[in-house]
Image (cartoon, rainbow, N blue to C red):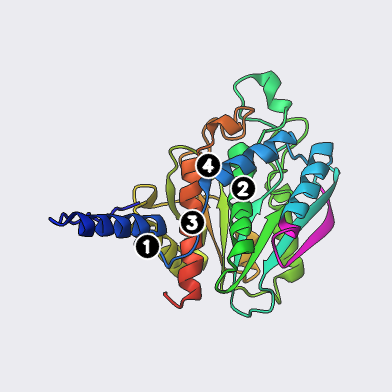
Amino acid sequence: MPRRPISLVPHAGLALISLALATFSCQRGPETAGGERFSGALADSLVDRQLAFGPRVPGTEAHAEALAWLTGYLGARADSVETIAFTHVTTRSDTLELTNVFARFRPAEPARILLVAHWDSRPVAERSADPAARRQPVPGANDGASGVAVLLALADLFAREPPPLGVDILLTDGEDWGHDPVTLETLGEDMLLGARHFARTRGETYRPLYGILLDLVGSPDPVFARDGISLQYAPEVVSRVWVVAAELGYGDIFVDRIGGATDDHLPLNEAGIRTIDIIDSAFLGEPPWHTTEDTADKISARTLGIVGEVVLEVIRRQGAGGF
Ligand code: ZN
């Protein structure tokens, strides 16, 4: 957070007032549109809470328990929460019972922003160095829980301070399935299942201003490059988010480089729901990604706090007509 210089004045009383003003403006953030600050500490605790269920792999008890908890958490904070259950038969003939969670703030508002993260965990840790670990599930601290945690912490804030426009939170299921159970080969057609279902069933009628997807947003040293698919479908939204991040002092993390991946935003964009992805190019493709080492102890409250602060500021500026 940039700090305003404290002016040195000879009169002690004035100096105190000046100090108080500087402290106040620092708490609020000198560039922000105002309001309560996002809590990275809360988001960090919400990663731990999700990990406590165990890997949220479709078909497991942990998955069912996590779903009940997520629905309850959002139900206590949002204006409405919908669970959207669906079935997917994989290319290897597994039948998956999946559920998207869709929570809405100020549902009557026509101007809306969609926030997305995937709540499931990958059933295989195929990138693990130890061959025996490759058939175990990924704990999914950064890959899943980090994005969800930021969105839950935003929901907590919005419960006290309603957003200046409509906000929808979509927690997708089945993003990280997509593997051959024998060879562990990645199967792209069995991934992004929740986003595909949402795109297929709501894509023709649901039109937020734009969407922001969060994935891999909890590493201590993230590199958020400008994602290629996002630039293709919603370049001005990428611009807004990266400009806001730079203005808040995070230009070293939200870097001016191209990167990114195929993610839940692809089916949403293809259905006309223009969505960008904030995703860590440095974490993607390297251990602990898709290993059993993607654990909560490697999650940074500071990074979660930065991502939450940036998204919150984008929402506030959008609501204030600041773009
Ligand atoms: Zn993954």
The reply to whether discs 2 and 4 touch (Cβ–Cβ < 8 Å) is yes
Which dot, 2 or 4, sits closer to the camera? Answer: 2
The residue beneath circle 1 is 243
The residue beneath circle 4 is 218
Give the mark nearer the N terminus: 2 vs 3. Answer: 3
Q: Amino acid at mark 2?
A: Ala
Q: Secondary structure at mark 1?
A: helix
Give the mark nearer the N terminus: 3 vs 4. Answer: 3
Q: Secondary structure at mark 2?
A: helix
The residue carrying pointer 2 sits among few (fewer than 14), some (14 to 19) or many (20 or more) residues within 10 Å by Cα, namely many
Q: CA distance from mark 3 to mark 1?
A: 19 Å
Q: Amino acid at mark 3?
A: Arg
The residue beneath circle 2 is 149
Q: Which residues are magenta?
A: 74-89
Q: Is residue 287 above or below residue 200?
A: above
Q: Secondary structure at mark 4?
A: loop
Q: Is residue 85 above or below residue 33?
A: above
In front of the other: 141 or 260 = 141
Residue 264 appears in the rendering:
no
Q: Position of residue 148 (x, y in %)?
A: 63, 49
Residue at the image point whose x is 53% and y is 42% from the top: 218
Left-right relation of 317 to 121: left
Residue at the image point whose x is 58% and y is 51% from the top: 150
Residue at the image point whose x is 77% and y is 53% from the top: 72
In front of the other: 84 or 314 = 314
Q: CA distance from mark 2 to mark 1?
A: 24 Å
The reply to whether discs 2 and 3 touch (Cβ–Cβ < 8 Å) is no
In front of the other: 314 or 285 = 314
Q: CA distance from mark 1 to mark 4?
A: 21 Å
Q: Main secondary structure of the magenta part?
A: strand
Q: CA distance from mark 3 to mark 4?
A: 18 Å
